[in-house]
Amino acid sequence: MDEGNGAASCKFLSMKREYKDSRQRQMSNESDKNKEYWIDEIAFLEARLNGSQGDIDSEDRSACEEALKTAKTNLSAYK
């Protein structure tokens, strides 16, 4: 195994965990969010699901789809 590829893979997995942790913290603070936040969140999640931010595995896809439903529900409270 190429050491460089292993290090890159570990860095990617670490970044992926940090991303998931960050998203979970953001989701736990939903009541503090405003309309603009939810608009940005929806745009981010749709881009993520469309592959604009790189490959997405099935676990991440499911989490993003669920988060997108929640974000749309939360945004609808402002209409």
Image: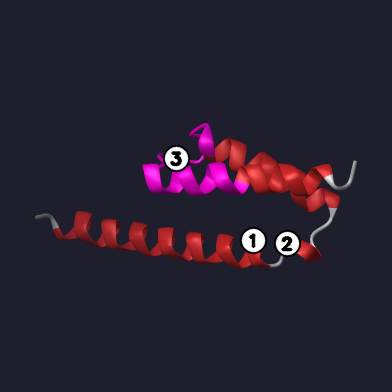
Q: Looking at the image, is 34 positioned above or below residue 50?
A: below
Residues shaded magenta: 49-67
Q: Tags 1 and 3 in contact by the CB under 8 Å rule?
A: no
Q: Mark 1 points at which residue?
A: 27
Q: Considering depth in this image, is 6 or 24 the residue closer to the camera?
A: 24
Which residue lies at the image location 21% right of the left edge and 54% below the top edge? 5
* Apparent side of residue 67 relative to residue 59 in the rendered image (left or right): right
The residue depicted at 52 percent of the width and 31 percent of the height is 50
Rendering quarter of residue 47: top right
Disc 2 residue type (three-letter): Glu
SS at mark 2 in the image = helix
Residues at marks 2 and 3, CA–CA distance in whole angstroms? 26 Å
* Residue identifier under label 2: 30
Residue type marked 1:
Met
Q: Do the residues labelled 1 and 2 touch (CB within 8 Å)?
A: yes
- For label 3, the residue is 54
Q: Which residue is drawn at 51% across and 66% down?
A: 21
